[in-house]
Amino acid sequence: MIEVRNLSFSYGRHRVLEDISFTVQDGEVLAVMGMNGSGKSTLISAIDRLRRPESGDVLIDGVPVSGMDRKAIAARIAYLPQRCEAAHLSVFDAVLLGRKPYMGFSAGKEDVSICRDMIHRMRLDHLMFRDLDELSGGELQKVLLARSLVQEPRVMLLDEPTSNLDPHNQYWMMSAVRNMASEKGIAVLAVFHDLNLAMAYADKLLFLKNGRSCCLCTPDKVDSALLKEVYAVNADIAEADGRRFAIIRKEFTL
Ligand SMILES: Nc1ncnc2c1ncn2[C@@H]1O[C@H](COP(=O)(O)OP(=O)(O)OP(=O)(O)O)[C@@H](O)[C@H]1O
Ligand SMILES: [Mg+2]
């Protein structure tokens, strides 16, 4: 379980996060939503302590992250950034890097076998020995997600994990993340812009507006008034396949 307590953060004098608090239980998926620049990526990186919060703390299974060193954090948190350089490194080696918190000087048999299994599970076998800089955007995103999963974290922080994926892979990937979260009891925080994908897979949605928590709710509570407040759009909510969909009205005149 992860608990974020009263987290605030500023870039210099620019306050970007203001007193954010929430918890995500083991096996739960929290979608972090909000307009461009609302503070989603900053929140994710402050939780991983890549950015030091001004105040507040993050607790994993009751233990404050502020008291942990980098290796201890890496053994608990897998972080998939929004932007990533495609290095001159094979897919297999890139996935193996996820095992670093558990390895000595070199990879053991178990590390290799965990990575092979994950590459197979992520349907990446045919790319195993290709270099990352030769992959498509979506293929690279799947490899980086595989790397996060072999880390066997307690918490996964995924910053727009499906932004480069086609519709099949978006839904397939989120099903895989959901299954693995329940199977291994991982708490997942994932940033999305696709409201319908978030409502399909998240247990809860956190909406940020100008760095403040505007609403923390279950998918069935997302309504037109909320979408108007968060995104300044007129939207209708429809139901199909036993779930809710947001349909944004096409009414911008430029
Ligand atoms: N390194 C930085 N230095 C100064 N300001 C920054 C830095 N990174 C981000 N910001 C600013 O902080 C605010 C929040 O940025 P952040 O990247 O967290 O937004 P976001 O919600 O992830 O947006 P997006 O949906 O576009 O990814 C923005 O106003 C941004 O310009
Ligand atoms: Mg971002």
Image: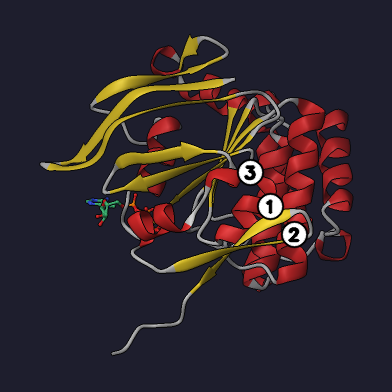
Label 2: state its secondary structure.
Answer: helix
Q: CA distance from mark 3 to mark 1?
A: 6 Å
Asked if the residues shown at circle 1 and circle 2 are in contact, with their CB atoms under 8 angstroms apart, the answer is yes
Label 1: state its secondary structure.
Answer: helix
Quadrant where the N terminus sits is top right
Residue 169 percent across, percent down from the top left: 75, 64
Give the residue number, with chain letter if any, for mark 3: 202
* Label ID, residue 171: 2
Q: CA distance from mark 3 to mark 2?
A: 12 Å
Label 3: state its secondary structure.
Answer: loop
Residue 35 percent across, percent down from the top left: 37, 58
Which amino acid does the dot numbered 2 rest on?
Tyr
Q: CA distance from mark 1 to mark 2?
A: 9 Å
Residue 59 is at least partly visible in this image: yes
* Label ID, residue 161: none
Quadrant of the image occupied by residue 187: top right
Quadrant of the image occupied by residue 197: bottom right
- In depth, the one of 199 and 179 nearer the eye is 199
Colour option used: secondary structure
Task: Spot the residue most to the bottom.
Answer: 254
- In depth, the one of 219 and 186 nearer the eye is 219
Which amino acid does the dot numbered 1 rest on?
Ala
Asked if the residues shown at circle 3 and circle 1 are in contact, with their CB atoms under 8 angstroms apart, the answer is yes
Q: Residue shown at 82%/30% (left/top)?
A: 183
Q: Residue shown at 20%/38% (left/top)?
A: 10
- In depth, the one of 94 and 9 nearer the eye is 9
Give the residue number, with chain letter if any, for mark 1: 200
- First reached walking from the N terminus: tag 3 or tag 2: 2
